[in-house]
Image: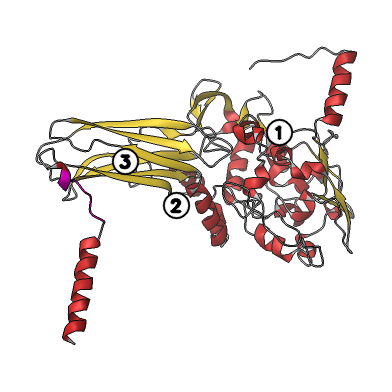
Amino acid sequence: MKERVVKGSLFFIVAVVLVSLFSGFAVATEATQFGEYSADGFTYESRCRQCHAIIYGEWEGTMHFNAYLDPFYLEEVKVASADTEGLVDEFCSRCHTPIGVVSGEIPPIDGSEMSDISKLGVQCDFCHVVSGSNGTGNAPFTVTPGDTKWGPFDDSKSAYHDSEYLELYTQSEYCGMCHEVIHPVNGLVIDDTYPTWKNSQYAEDNVICQDCHMTEGITEFKANPGRAGSGAPKREHISSHDIVGANAFIPVMFGAENVADMAIERLQNAATLEITVPEIAASGEEVTIEAAITNSGAGHNIPTGVSEIRQIWLEVMVTDSEGEELYSAGTLDTNGNIESAKIIYNNVLGDNSGNATDSFWLADRVLEDNRIGPKETVIEEHTFILPDDIVYPLKVETNLNYRSAPQYTIDHLFGEGMYEVPVISMNEASNTIYDPAMPPEDRKESTPGFSIFAACMAFILMMYIFK
């Protein structure tokens, strides 16, 4: 890890002050520390929903709602705490139960001293008493619990609480407080969602996190007219508070199928897939399938977050017209393990011995970074020899798949058969390989099921005529 040493000087101090004042970002404030406030100073979401019912309904069941209750997080953080003798307890909890940390209720990591409001994860009152930040990364938020609520409007009025505008709410830096995670000991960047966006074309074009994750659009801004609360003025755009990412696994556990459906839709709009195959190929010939995968809809790497456990991979299947399998890669075995994938697009972390690890708290290096950056295209090739006795035409089918974690990780934490991690098709593409002896004019792929459809229509027409 490279260390940068900044030598103090009057010029440097003046420069920092000027940048803070004129850069357009919120001036840094001191981050709220462990145990600085009582949990009693925060307001339960049940009070907020009385005036903000629509926004509450959007937030309920999301990953922010379940940031602490997520069973995968609860099991992982127990292991991380044991492995590090409690070193990461506050570190992890600061984003997953921020009220629990600023009120001094975490640690202990088992939650035995937590109040009910601290278990509500990233909830309404916490987000809207954020009054500043000390930059991004590792949750350097400043919170000021009380009657004043901060937000993105400079003309808000409420009969229940005071309202203040804070520019931070209109910037990606608000999200970057938690969506940039740096190892507390060795400085390894574990989650680079914010910095990847910061260095992308999206940032240059001033497309911020909220434009994609807090609108009715999936991968671009779409206005959402409405009111922030009952009695509030109608506005051209109200931020949607579902703030869905790619997790379609955990929401279903809490009955939030609608959130899972939105996550699937987001995944299916994140990447494009195009394949190139030869039009003809003979037995004994080497065939190459070329797949072009483009991160066309995400302003950050795909996958992102704790990307050492996220998995994106290409599944390829080639069969002849009788269903005989000629080639396959990226399929799942009976235990849910990925077989023969050309590459798994994720981050491979290493521990201090150089061994790959899925436990980011034990990592101190990146062994491989196979993720796909914003607007980046990667090419994946599959080559095989066509066997004898094949029946033409041949079908080439590809699926770009995603899942939140390997099945073996979930089985290890909860026991085999407890949870099945859903595999989501982000995109698919297919093509046909023909017999070289077939005349070119006959190499036209028929529409699947069309002949059956045509026969049925003909039968219905005949029945009508003779009736």
Query: Compared to 291, does 217 lie above or below?
Result: below
Give the image location of residue 157, x and y in percent: 87, 59
Magenta stretch, main secondary structure class: loop
Q: Is residue 309 left or right of residue 44?
A: left
How far apart in space, not on screen, are marks 1 and 3 (Cα)?
38 Å
Residue at x 62% of width, y 47% of height: 212
Spot occupied by residue 190 in the image (x, y as percentages of width and height): 61, 31
Q: Residue at x 21, y 71 (%)?
A: 456
Please give the label number shown on residue 137: 1
Q: Dot 3 surroundings within 10 Å: few (below 14), some, or many (20 or more)?
A: many
Q: Is residue 367 something that shows in the picture?
A: yes
Tell me which amino acid carries mark 2: Glu
Location of residue 93 by image quarter:
top right
Question: Which image quarter is the N terminus in?
Answer: top right
- x%, y% of residue 201? 60, 32
Pick whichever, 201 or 169, lies toward us. Answer: 201
Earlier-in-chain disc, 1 versus 2: 1
Mark 3 vs mark 2, CA separation in Å: 22 Å
> Going by the image, does 333 lie left or right of 74?
left
Q: Which residues are magenta?
A: 441-447
**Which disc is residue 316 wearing?**
3
Label 3's element?
strand
Q: Nearer the viewer, mark 1 or mark 2?
A: 1
Residue at the disc numbered 2: 420
Queried whether the magenta region covers residue 327, the answer comes back as no
Residue 106 in view here:
no
Q: Tell me the element at label 2.
A: loop
